[in-house]
Amino acid sequence: MSTTSTTSAAAAQGHRRHMIAVVVLVPVLVALALWAFAWPAARTAPRDLPLGVAGPSTAVTQVEQQLSAHEGAFDIHRYADEAAARDAIEDRTVYGAVVVTAQGPKLLTASAASPFVAQLLQQAVTTQAAQSGAQVTTVDVVPAAANDPRGAAFGASVLPLALAGVAAGAVVTLLGLRGVRAVGTLLGSAALVGVVAATIAHSWLGVLTGDWWTEAAALGLTTLAVSGAVAGLASLLGTAGIGLGGLTVVLIGNPFSGASSAPQLLPEPVGAIGQWLPPGAGASLLRSVSFFDGAGALGPALTLAWWAALGLGAVLLGSALKRRTEERNAGPVTATTEREPALVN
């Protein structure tokens, strides 16, 4: 067999392997995407959802027993009066509270924390009270933005930030930027994304209502956590790190974030996992700074900061390792001198 025939056969075999890999990989990715996006959405239900009750002790005990009928649905917190319950909602300790009054039960909600949860609580408490013929008064303690009462625009903001972070990390890697230059580029791009996103979401669409610069910082930090993670993985693992980081953030972090509902409505342990990933932590941080004056912002801010620090640290480490490898492969440079031929007398 000639060399040309052998080469052609090897090339054909390589093409067949690539075709098989694509045929197998595409269904696997589709199955993963359907599992990550559709499964949590199909299993949405309250799971230890923090809910407060307030009022006279005897009446509160009765309400607790009624709510306990929904086994595993609510994590009940008892408060002395309505004022204390309102403070707990504003501090993001609970999503709502049932206050027992002489005029009947009053439901306190916070649609800014989750319009979906506010509606769910209203349905559950109203149905429960209807069995005894009572009328429920509902008060939205911390309302969502008037331009986004259902939270649709807020929930849709998570994916663009994730994509922006993945794109920034990928571009920095593919352009061959290393070390301090790569870190500076990631920091600059994240800051610019934060400013642009705040301009669109706050100034133009009006779906965010907090301090503009604080919101821009939260949006930028979320982007930096993603871009740093992607660039850091790529710096240590090569271009495969871009795919690994992108899949983790987009296919896992985005649907597990609970941005359009709440982490406590997702199947366990999906909600908890989502809050440890940048999209979930970013959504929680943005809610806190936009609607709750920063209450509950420390945890998600630290999570994002850790992602950003570890990612940027990996970028610097990978750059140092590559530089050392290149120097080792280059070897010592030896000086050579040419001898002139001896003169013959």
Image: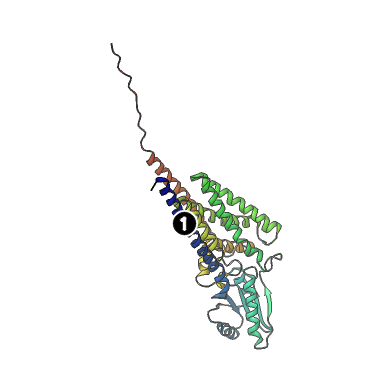
Find disc 1 in the rendering and name its residue.
Answer: 16
Q: Residue extending furthest bottom? A: 132
| Label 1 CA crowd tier, 10 Å (few <14, some 14–19, many 20+) | few
Q: Amino acid at mark 1?
A: Arg
Q: Image quarter for residue 13? A: bottom left
Q: Quadrant of the C terminus?
A: top left
- Residue at the spot x=50%, y=64% of the render? 28
* Image height of 330 relative to 211, above or below: above
Q: Position of residue 309 (x, y in %)?
A: 49, 54
Return the residue nearer the eye: 120 or 174: 174
Is residue 99 in sight in this rendering? no
* Image height of 331 relative to 340, above or below: below
- Side (left or right) of 224 relative to 321: right
Q: Residue extending furthest top? A: 345
Q: Position of residue 140 (x, y in %)?
A: 67, 72
SS for dot 1: helix
Return the residue nearer the eye: 309 or 20: 20
Is residue 238 in sight in this rendering? yes
Q: Position of residue 22 (x, y in %)?
A: 50, 59
- Side (left or right) of 324 relative to 61: left
Q: Residue extending furthest front? A: 1
